[in-house]
Image (cartoon, rainbow, N blue to C red):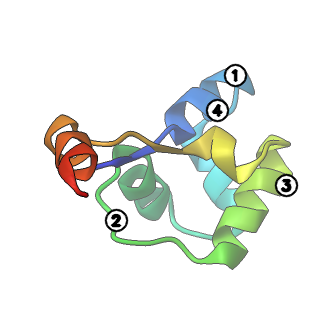
Amino acid sequence: MTIIVNLDVMLARRKMRSRELSERIGITEQNVSLLKSGKVKGVRFETLEKICEVLDCQPGDILEFRPEPDTQQAIKKEP
């Protein structure tokens, strides 16, 4: 996966537990756990907005793009 979810890092920086975040943004603790592990295929902008509000951060603090090595090589070879 080339999109990395750094939600656990932001929670640690804010000294907040998943349970507190889930209560404050209105989703289940299980869904927060799935999001933290990167096992989701998407996230609603509304949910991302609430997370950013509660954690006082930007979407880029939570989501990171890391190209896979073979993808970068294929891009470089294109004319």
Q: Is residue 57 in view from this perspective? A: yes
For the point 40% across and 59% down, which residue is it? 30
For the point 26% across and 44% down, which residue is it? 76
> What SS does tag 1 mark?
helix
> What SS does tag 4 mark?
helix
- Name the residue carrying label 2: 40
- Distance from disc 3 to disc 2, alpha carbons, whole Å, reads 21 Å
- Name the residue carrying label 3: 53
Is 31 above or below relative to 66?
below
- Name the residue carrying label 4: 10
Image mark for residue 35 = none
What is the three-letter code of the residue carrying label 2?
Val
Q: Earlier in the sequence, mark 4 or mark 2?
A: 4
Q: Position of residue 33 (x, y in %)?
A: 41, 51
Cβ–Cβ below 8 Å for labels 1 and 4?
yes
Q: Earlier in the sequence, mark 2 or mark 1?
A: 1
- Distance from disc 4 to disc 3, alpha carbons, whole Å, reads 12 Å
- Distance from disc 4 to disc 2, alpha carbons, whole Å, reads 18 Å
What is the three-letter code of the residue carrying label 3?
Glu
- Numbered label tally: 4
